Image: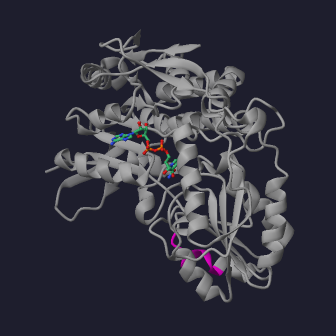
Amino acid sequence: MHATQLLIHNEWTDASTGATGNTISPANGEPIGTFAEASGTDVDAAVASARKGFESDAWQSMSPDLRGKLLWRIGQLIEENAEELAALETLDQGQPTFISTNISVPLAAQVFRYYAGYATKIEGKVSPVSIPDQLSYQTRVPIGVTGLITPWNFPLPIAAWKLAPALATGNAAILKPAEQTPLSTAYLARLCVEAGVPAGVVTLLTGGPEVGKALVAHRGIDKISFTGSTAVGQEIVTTSARDLKRLSLELGGKAPSIVCADADIDSAVQGNLQGALFNTGQACGAFTRFFVHRSKVDEFATKIAAAADSLKIGPGQDPDTIVGPLASEEHLGRVAGYVKSGNDEGAQLVTGGERVGGELANGFFYRPTVFTGVKDDMTIAREEIFGPVLSIMPFDDMDEAIARANNTRYGLVAVLWTQDLKTAHSLPKKIRAGTVFVNQLPLIDPGSPWGGFGMSGWGREMGSYSIDEFTEPQTVFINLS
Ligand code: NAD
């Protein structure tokens, strides 16, 4: 059993009330660990410590070079502990080993290396003002104490892609992982201490939504960087309005995949299958709404349903597993509810549509599910399911496909399948999504911005965008007269 505590001022401590929560294995429903359930008093202590850490000489006077070195060291430690971290991520989140080993952990290390390089390259500028005898220049200064609230689908890399730029820019950070999956983030906090982060600069608060709410409402927090559901993102906007906290919001998605008449169907089937079922569909960029040209829709549906059926379902620890469990029983119930709505509203179930039984019956496994005959106004075509459910819809011409793809309140990701270079270049700008992939799975790279239009959120993460998100521009006027 894993038992994690809170990290406040570089000291590990139980919650002040002694309360703990349980984390369970999605593969079999068994408890695998406990975490300290932070109280309001702990949140106050964490924020006070983070303020001290932010203002400390150790942090304020650390040169950009040394800050970069510190981040690099954290990245190295992630790599040195990769096997253990990947095992922990698979145990707690359920994701197949091929994902935790080849994507989640290496991406977390890569993000720290990327922002290690940035620490020495956060430049200002000089503005050509017209007032005589004045020098006006701008620098980017850290925002202060930041609350980093993360979801359960990719706990480690999402924590990393907030923490690394927060530290590169000189902020103090309070990590608040999801209550379902705290283990890898607690491990990351331990590696930060081992790397030499000054006291108060990295804090870990574990617990449920109440802890997140307390951070958002706390007057001592200057910025919230949140990844999670759109509903919680909206609540954060409302609560933080009182203090006009700085916000970055990476929220839900409902990605369209447009398969053109000229697409290579076999590669579109393979790419869409992986894009839809990666981490059992528990990815904000998961492909979910498949607009397939009418001339190809039957072939596409038959092939993708057969391919979905052939994928090995099992515990993430089994190296052959492609489709792991859903992250929690509650989430399994939500996905099953969406499938029921698809059936009730008249979509045709081609395959899947049920929980997996037999020796996997204690885990939260759900069969990859394909619907055809889906109408744009059905619940499964409108709402984020965050599970292994594909909705296939025919289209007749490109303008229609684009209009229907854009007919959503989300706008995180879209994908286009075509062999025509002109279509590949001319369509993305017509699609309202933060990232448009062409003939491609959903990819994330620290050098490329990530974020969405509409109700998929505010701001962008990665690249120079995260540097902007974690700093305020500050102008200085020097009197030269
Ligand atoms: P969630 O919104 O329920 O929870 C996310 C985090 O917020 C957790 O740590 C939770 O404890 C905390 N929280 C819950 N209520 C809160 C409140 N009122 N105030 C402050 N904090 C609160 O999301 P989830 O179910 O863990 O994650 C799934 C969602 O995350 C999906 O909607 C998915 O699309 C989204 N997501 C988006 C991205 C992206 O980059 N856009 C990436 C991954 C996941």
Nearer to the camera, 121 or 356: 356
Q: Position of residue 138 (x, y in %)?
A: 30, 49
Nearer to the camera, 299 or 176: 299
User: Bounds of the magenta span?
Assistant: 426-432
The residue drawn where x is 51% and y is 41% is 330
Quadrant occupied by the N terminus: top right
| On screen, residue 72 above or below 456 | above
Q: Quadrant of residue 187?
A: top right
Magenta-colored stretch includes residue 365: no
Is residue 406 found left or right of 270 in the rendered image?
Answer: left
Q: Quadrant of residue 268?
A: bottom right
Q: Quadrant of residue 203?
A: top left
Is residue 176 found left or right of 449 in the rendered image?
Answer: left
The residue drawn where x is 55% and y is 63% is 341
Nearer to the camera, 128 or 3: 3
| On screen, residue 249 above or below 296 | above
Is residue 467 found left or right of 140 in the rendered image?
Answer: right
Q: How is the image coloured?
A: one colour
| On screen, residue 75 above or below 325 | above
Q: Position of residue 276 (x, y in %)?
A: 68, 57
Residue 414, visible in the rendered structure: yes
Q: Position of residue 423 (x, y in %)?
A: 70, 81
- The quarter of the image that holds ligand 1 is top left
The residue drawn where x is 76% and y is 76% is 418
| On screen, residue 14 above or below 443 | above
Residue 435, visible in the rendered structure: no
Q: Position of residue 355 (x, y in %)?
A: 68, 46
The residue drawn where x is 48% and y is 55% is 252
Is residue 117 found left or right of 309 in the rendered image?
Answer: left
